Image (cartoon, rainbow, N blue to C red):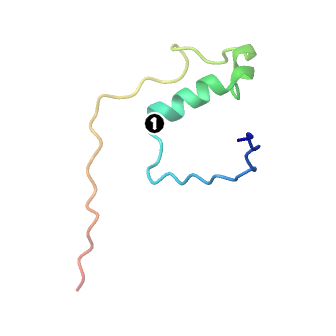
């Protein structure tokens, strides 16, 4: 029996679940798309900007009274 060359076949894969944030992070880190950022200078440091106040943010009611 002679070996037959297989025909080309297209295979479609559908993923039902989205990729996790950890997997997406690994893709971004290993993919090389952001490698150019390594050459960019750091423009800001921890000493830049203004410190945040320790005052709590007031809560806002999101419901409206209908009269």
- Rate crowding at label 1 as few (under 14), some (14 to 19) or many (20 or more) other CA atoms within 10 Å: few
Residue, disc 1 = 21
Q: Where does the image place residue 19, in percent across and percent down from the top left?
A: 47, 42
> 4 or 56, which lies in front?
4
Q: In which quarter of the image is the N terminus?
A: top right
Quadrant in the rendering for residue 56: top left
Q: Is residue 47 above or below residue 2?
A: above
Q: Where does the image place residue 30, in percent across and percent down from the top left?
A: 62, 23
Farthest-out residue, bottom:
67
> 53 or 32, which lies in front?
32
**Going 71% across and 21% down the picture, which residue do you hit?**
35
Q: Is residue 39 above or below residue 11?
A: above
Instruction: Left or right? Give the position of 17 relative to 45.
Output: left
Secondary-structure class at tag 1: helix
Instruction: Left or right? Give the position of 33 relative to 45.
Output: right
Quadrant in the rendering for residue 37: top right
Q: In this view, does 44 lie above or below 21?
A: above
**Going 26% across and 51% down the picture, which residue do you hit?**
59
Q: Where does the image place residue 9, in percent across and percent down from the top left?
A: 70, 52
Instruction: Left or right? Give the position of 26 relative to 39.
Output: left
> 9 or 20, which lies in front?
9
Q: Quadrant of the C terminus?
A: bottom left
Quadrant in the rendering for residue 43: top right
Q: How many labels does the image show?
A: 1
Farthest-out residue, front:
1
**Going 54% across and 27% down the picture, which residue do you hit?**
26
Q: Where does the image place residue 39, in percent across and percent down from the top left?
A: 75, 14
């Amino acid at each position: 029996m002679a070996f037959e060359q297989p025909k080309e076949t297209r295979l479609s894969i559908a993923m039902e679940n989205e990729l996790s944030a950890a997997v997406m992070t690994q893709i971004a880190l290993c993919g090389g798309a952001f490698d150019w950022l390594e050459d960019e200078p750091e423009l800001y440091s921890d000493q830049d900007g203004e410190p945040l106040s320790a005052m709590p943010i007031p809560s806002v009611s999101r419901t409206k009274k209908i009269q």
